Structure formats: C-alpha cells, structure tokens
Amino acid sequence: PKGHFRDLVERLVEELGVDVVLVGGEEDVPYVKGFVDELACSDGVADLTGKLKLPELVELLKRSALYVGNDSSILHLAVALGVPTVSFFGPETPDLYGPLGDAHKVFYADLPCSPCLAAYNFKSSDCEDNICLERIGVEEVFDACRQMLAEGG
C-alpha cells in the first residue's frame, strides 16, 4: 500500500540515514509519484521509476545494499544478482515464488483468500481489497531492513 511504502521510505532515510532509490516500470510512475509527493523527506530519495533500461537497472541493483519491494520481476532480478531482499507477497504465495536463503526476508499475511492469483495456472482475481498487503506492518518491515543492513546486507 502506498502509505506503507511512504512511511517505510521516510523511516529508512530519517532513522537509518540510507539513500533510497525508487525503481519500476513506466506503468508504476503515477503510483510512485503519488507517494513521493507526500514524503516528508526528499533528500536521500531518488525517483528513477520508468527511467532505467534493463542494463542500468542491473548495475544499480549490483551496487545496492538491499532491495525492498513487492513480488515482481525486479525482486527476482535482485535475488539472481545476489542482492539481499525484503519482499512482500499477498495475492501470490511465496511458497512457489519467494526467494530462498538467509539473505532474503519474506513477508506474507497467509490469509484464507490468498493466493488469489497464481501465474502457474492462470488463476486471476478481481479483488480490490488488498488486506493481504495492508496486514504487513511498516514497523516489522523496517526492523527487518535495519537488521539486514546491520548484517551487511
């Protein structure tokens, strides 16, 4: 959820002093702009959403201490490049698609309605209630980020 991402970015910048780079495809630009405009802190945040080609994204990820984001192609690219990750799964299950290993922390609400999407069998959903992601708290995600960054991730 947009408010969760905004709050997490603010805490990472203000409390941990990390630089945050926002990435995504062109289709993500309106969503990201929506919460970037609401950020209390603009120093330490670079919005590169919709601006990077794949080779540039790969180079950025290689230099990243941590990737934080939803289940997406960028998450899986970060995992393949050996970048530690903190990821969120809601409509899809991490049992099939989640990163494995100690360098990755996965958040999943495990509700009875999830997974409501499944790429492997083309299961789709018109669910507009993202409670599966709303239930993942900013505090627990921030704590995971802090721990992984402290461990050198």
Image: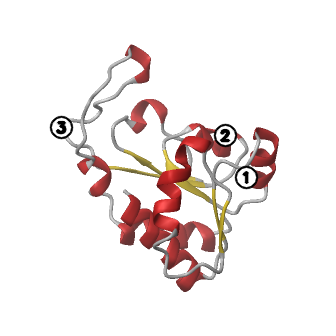
| Residue 125 point in image, percent of width and height | 28, 28
| Residue 96 point in image, percent of width and height | 44, 29
How far separated are the C-alphas under marks 1 and 3?
Answer: 34 Å
Quarter of the C terminus within the rendering: bottom right
- The residue located at (59%, 37%) in the rendering is 73
Amino acid on which the number 1 mark rests in the picture: Leu
**Disc 2 and disc 1 in contact, CB within 8 angstroms:** yes
The image quarter in which residue 92 lies: top left
User: Most extreme residue toward the left, as rendered?
Assistant: 112
- The residue located at (52%, 67%) in the rendering is 36
Label 2 belongs to which residue? 77
Amino acid on which the number 2 mark rests in the picture: Leu
Amino acid on which the number 3 mark rests in the picture: Pro
User: Which label's residue is closer to the chain start, 2 or 1?
Assistant: 1
| Residue 117 point in image, percent of width and height | 34, 28
Label 1 belongs to which residue? 61
Q: What is the crowding at mark 3: few (fewer than 14 residues within 10 Å), some, or many (at least 20)?
A: few
Asked if one can make out residue 72 in the rendered structure from this viewpoint, the answer is: yes
User: Which label's residue is closer to the chain start, 3 or 2?
Assistant: 2
- The residue located at (53%, 71%) in the rendering is 147
| Residue 43 point in image, percent of width and height | 65, 81
Label 3 belongs to which residue? 112
Q: Nearer the viewer, residue 100 or 107?
A: 107
> SS class of the residue under badge 2?
helix
